[in-house]
Amino acid sequence: MDYSFVLNLKDNDVLDTQIMLTQGDYGVIRFLFDIIDDGEYITDAVRVSVVFRRHDGTNVSGYMTLTDGKYVYELQGSELAVPGKVAAEVKLFYENGRVSSGKFLFGVRPDPLSEPVTEAGPFRAELQRIIDEATEAFIQKRNELQALIDLLTPEIGGTYLVKDSLTTRTDITEPGQYALDASVLQNLKPATEVSTEFTPAPDLANLVTGEELSVMLGKLARWYVELTGKLDANKVVNNLLTTEEGFVLDARQGKALAEQIVEVGNQVNSDYKLLGTVTGIGASHNIAYPETFRELRIDVFPSAENDVLGFQFSLIPAQIPEGGSVKRYCGGSPTGRADFKVTSSCMYIERYTVNDAVQSQALIIAYYR
């Protein structure tokens, strides 16, 4: 069956064809278009594509052919796989590079044979079966929900953790009130960057919250020098296990404590895995996503020879665009700027400038977990 209609590319409204087709039909249904632009019938397009957006959000694409002055599209079947409204967009490509488009709508009615069919039988028996199944499903879901509630309820305080419970502060002392935000992990230094070198402090001073590790070790060393000879050597312990009152800690344990801090930081960051490295500008120099991940971390450097970080950001699956749409992330140092594109399948730098000079390449390193 053929359906003919006129598609005016200058019409700002979407053409509602009022056509209703049946779910799953194919092969014998054709759309015949008279396409008008600026009052003239179009027949000189070198390629005409059409994209159908089904009611479930899935896109189906195909091409039209020019026959007897009309652009013809024969439905293959997948366009009508889902009942509901279908929005279609026609794009015409010309030899001079110009592209024009128009949109139209049609409907798809459900095919009763594609749905489960209940055999004829007594109404009360069937109704009771439905009630029994619904009751059983309700009890199962209630038990699953209770199990989830029990899992999410912290033992301390018995309260739920919500978004407002997350914090990036590291000076919280109230028990059971806050949880540490995962973004804090980005500020932890790798083990190779934590230095245990220090110089003894010139004067006696107490430790202060937030001081650098080297400053704290220097103060401890200064106290050790001050107390050497004034303490009973038998009261100085070189371990972290003593619980008896009246003993003091040997300064050598400062290094042991620092190494433990390094180890903890290293364990926190070891969750990331290297995804890939690429050098260059443009879509051909891209990094594809892993099959599954919960977070990507992207480091960008001005060039392969420059070890100064241009900018860094993270992506989660919810930020990856669907279909062929593109998201752009701009960032960089005060002297540099990058247009970083994220598509449905990969990510890459489209343009990178440093000191207003366009770069021909940049280094991208991606990690995932």
Image (cartoon, rainbow, N blue to C red):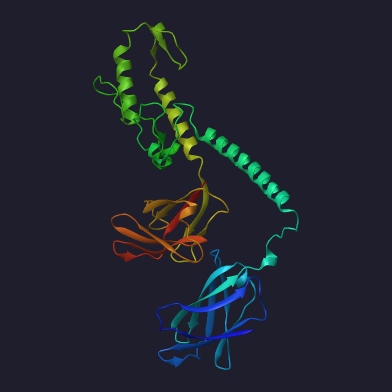
Q: Nearer the viewer, residue 15 or 297?
A: 15
Can you tell which quarter of the image residue 248 is in? top left
Residue in the image at 41% along x and 36% along y: 180
Q: Position of residue 58 (x, y in %)?
A: 56, 65
Q: Is residue 146 left or right of residue 226?
A: right
Residue in the image at 66% along x and 46% along y: 131
Residue in the image at 61% along x and 42% along y: 138
Residue farthest to the left?
A: 203
Q: Is residue 335 left or right of residue 34?
A: left
Q: Position of residue 188 (x, y in %)?
A: 40, 38
Q: Nearer the viewer, residue 299 or 135?
A: 135
Q: Is residue 39 above or below residue 203?
A: below
Q: Nearer the viewer, residue 251 or 90?
A: 90
Q: Position of residue 139 (x, y in %)?
A: 62, 39
Rendered-image quadrant of the N terminus: bottom right
Q: Is residue 312 above or below residue 18?
A: above
Q: Is residue 177 left or right of residue 46?
A: left
Can you tell which quarter of the image residue 363 is in? bottom left
Q: Is residue 239 above or below residue 140?
A: above
Give the total number of marks visible in the rendering.
0
Can you tell which quarter of the image residue 169 is in? top left
